[in-house]
């Protein structure tokens, strides 16, 4: 399915659009099947919309928090109270402020000194939750992703081994330029989601955004190009600053 690109005026409008998508999709999933599974991302852009969901009564009161199950797309090798933890950010600005049952929050245990073990443990969490048989993939209702200045997404960095993984659900991915391991969901898992939404904001994202959406297909250099949910929806929510180099119809 061809990706949809929605351009909004600024970061605040982006937060509102993301929160609206989250709310509507959560309500619809709960209406249809009684639950909603979502994968969260880290970074400053999702932080803004997480805050809006928790602090704006219009959103907070319409979200079926007790029916939502939260997961993460990736995590840094830090404990959950560390300032760089993706879990900590989401917990501080949203999860700690809303009535989500603690058992519905499934974080990646980045504090494990063995990143490969942390990946194995999280893969087992997914297998148990979704009751997967060998070879099956989890079907998340919604996945939020960001776009790095080097066109990485989740912790799928350019020219790293995780880009080639086809069997595992979760892997540890050595990122040489950062001299660290990251734990990340794999491309097959992300592409099996019912909907993937990229959130992209700011002038510094204009060039990587144009490269991913309008450049040659070079996924080893531009990993975000690998994300093509099938069957599923792909939505790019971008502000005007990030979209400034895109060709307009």
Image (cartoon, grey):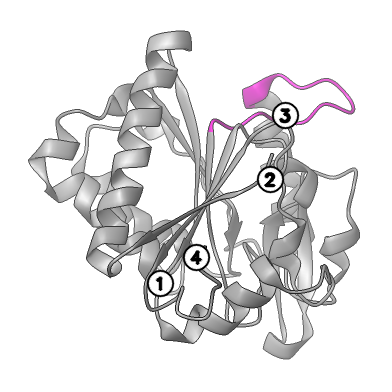
Across and down, in percent, residue 213 comes to 65, 66
Q: Which residue is mark 4?
A: 79
Q: Nearer the viewer, mark 1 or mark 4?
A: 1
Q: Nearer the viewer, mark 3 or mark 2?
A: 2
Instruction: Please give the label number shown on residue 137.
Output: none
Q: CA distance from mark 4 to mark 3?
A: 23 Å
| Residue 224 sits in quarter | bottom right
Q: Nearer the viewer, residue 65 or 127?
A: 65
Q: Nearer the viewer, residue 114 or 73?
A: 73
Tell me: residue 10, above or below residue 167.
Answer: below
Dot 1 surroundings within 10 Å: few (below 14), some, or many (20 or more)? many
Q: Which residue is mark 2?
A: 190
Comes first in the chain, label 1 or label 3: 3
The stretch in magenta equals: 129-141
Q: CA distance from mark 1 to mark 3?
A: 33 Å
Q: Nearer the viewer, residue 119 or 206?
A: 206
Is 108 one of the magenta-colored residues?
no
Q: CA distance from mark 4 to mark 2?
A: 24 Å
Q: CA distance from mark 3 to mark 2?
A: 15 Å
From the image, give the main secondary structure of the stretch colored magenta: loop
Q: Nearer the viewer, mark 2 or mark 1?
A: 1
Q: Nearer the viewer, mark 4 or mark 3?
A: 3
Task: Name the secondary structure under disc 4.
Answer: loop
Q: CA distance from mark 1 to mark 4?
A: 28 Å
Q: Which residue is mark 3?
A: 127
| Residue 240 sits in quarter | bottom left
Q: Residue at x 72, y 31 (%)?
A: 231
Q: Which residue is mark 1?
A: 201
Dot 2 surroundings within 10 Å: few (below 14), some, or many (20 or more)? many
Comes first in the chain, label 1 or label 4: 4
Tell me: residue 48, above or below residue 141.
Answer: below
Dot 3 surroundings within 10 Å: few (below 14), some, or many (20 or more)? some
């Amino acid at each position: 399915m061809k990706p949809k690109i929605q351009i909004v005026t600024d970061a605040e409008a982006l937060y509102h659009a993301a929160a609206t998508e989250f709310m509507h999709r959560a309500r619809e999933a709960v209406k249809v099947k009684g639950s909603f599974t979502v994968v969260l991302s880290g970074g400053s852009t999702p932080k803004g919309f997480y805050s809006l969901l928790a602090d704006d009564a219009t959103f907070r009161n319409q979200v079926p928090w007790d029916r939502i199950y939260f997961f993460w797309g990736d995590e840094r090798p830090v404990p959950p109270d560390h300032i760089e933890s993706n879990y900590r950010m989401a917990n501080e600005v949203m999860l700690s402020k809303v009535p989500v049952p603690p058992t519905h929050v499934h974080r990646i245990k980045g504090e494990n000194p063995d990143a490969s073990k942390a990946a194995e443990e999280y893969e087992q969490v997914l297998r148990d939750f979704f009751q997967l048989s060998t070879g099956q993939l989890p079907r998340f209702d919604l996945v939020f992703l960001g776009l790095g200045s080097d066109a990485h997404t989740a912790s799928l960095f350019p020219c790293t081994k995780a880009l080639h993984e086809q069997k595992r659900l979760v892997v540890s991915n050595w990122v040489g330029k950062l001299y660290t391991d990251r734990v990340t969901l794999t491309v097959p898992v992300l592409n099996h989601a019912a909907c993937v939404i990229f959130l992209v904001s700011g002038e510094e994202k204009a060039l990587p955004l144009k490269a991913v959406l309008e450049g040659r297909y070079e996924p080893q250099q531009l990993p975000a190009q690998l994300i093509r949910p099938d069957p599923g929806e792909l939505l790019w929510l971008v502000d005007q600053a990030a979209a400034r180099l895109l060709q307009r119809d």
